[in-house]
Image (cartoon, rainbow, N blue to C red):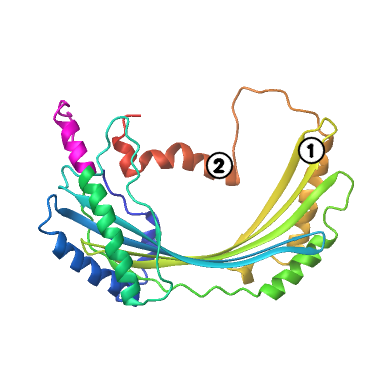
Amino acid sequence: MRRILPLVLSGLVPVLLTAQTPLIEILKEEMERNLSVLKGADPAPHFLAYAVTDVETETAVASLGALQNTNHGRGRYLDVTVRVGSAKLDNFRRVRGDLPQFTSGSPISLDDQPNAIRRRLWLETDRVYRAAAQRLSNIKTTQQFKIGEADDPGDFSSAPALAAVEPVARLKFSRDEWSNKLRKWSADFGLKPGILGSSITILAQREVKTLVTSDGIRLEHGRTFARLVIGAQGKAADGMDLSTTEFLEAEDPERLPDEKAVRAAIQKVERDLLGLLKAPVVEPFVGPAILSGRAAGVFFHEIFGHRIEGHRQRDES
């Protein structure tokens, strides 16, 4: 499998700082210790990576002037990658008919408490290494009965070491303020005949990703994100359930559109739903289609983006 670093990393170039946050230091030290222990194992790892994703979320939902739900959550999740064998042939090789799950996330301490994090790192490294060793053994057995491929570029290619830390702003979210706004905006929303249900939801999120690898990569970067979701539901005369939705997005809650824009979005949702309730059922159509906006992005992602992922380039299907 060829490894392709995410394009988002290019955004780190303007801010290259000393990659030495407490979490990076803990991950680096434990990685070095585990590598020294596993050096004499058979098979030995030729690459090790620790990735930590720290996600904090705030949500609130209101309908018809009443607050339905509020929630605050935060979690840190560890993903361990162990590649055993060699760059030419390792446990990430795709085998016909095989649908492997190489890694799975595991929760870790929210605090940069070395002992708590190191214990989880040790347990996950041991678990993933054992699975990797077993899979490599199975792959080698399969390879003995397979004619060599004409083009075998190997399973892994190294990347240049990169150290960069991009500070991520704290999540600024006033639950009381947003709860009052949602109550007010939803109070007169959906009272028109035909609209059976409606809601306005705010989601605010802060995500920080940390990556430490055995070939010298030390990265920490992330973003904040906010979204307003305005939705309504109805039922047509023939019993068909219909719904319309509008999204308003920004990099943080304070930069979401103002009340005028929100009310305009509410009116659009109402107008679209009432129009759908009266519209005739569309006949089946076969022919060209023009996609724009969100639909175009999702379509491109699904039909092209996934196909150029490193591990999929080796997949016969």
Q: Quadrant of the C terminus?
A: top left
Vertical comparison of 69 with 175: above or below: above
**Residue span colored magenta:** 135-156
Q: Amino acid at mark 1?
A: Leu
Percent x, y for residue 56?
52, 67
Q: Amino acid at mark 2?
A: Ala
| Residue 148 in magenta stretch | yes
Question: What secondary structure is found at the residue carrying circle 1?
Answer: helix
Percent x, y for residue 240?
77, 33
Along the line of sight, which residue is nearer the eye, 293 or 229?
229
Residue in the picture at 23% in, 56% down:
159
Question: What secondary structure is found at the residue carrying circle 2?
Answer: helix
Along the line of sight, which residue is nearer the eye, 283 or 16?
283
The residue wearing badge 1 is 276
In the picture, the disc for residue 83 is none
Count of numbered circles on the image = 2
The residue wearing badge 2 is 296
Vertical comparison of 148 with 53: above or below: above
Vertical comparison of 46 with 255: above or below: above
Residue in the picture at 73% in, 45% down:
244
Along the line of sight, which residue is nearer the eye, 221 or 210?
210
Quarter of the image holding residue 135? top left
Residue in the picture at 20% in, 47% down:
133
Label 2 or label 1, whichever lies nearer to me, is: 1
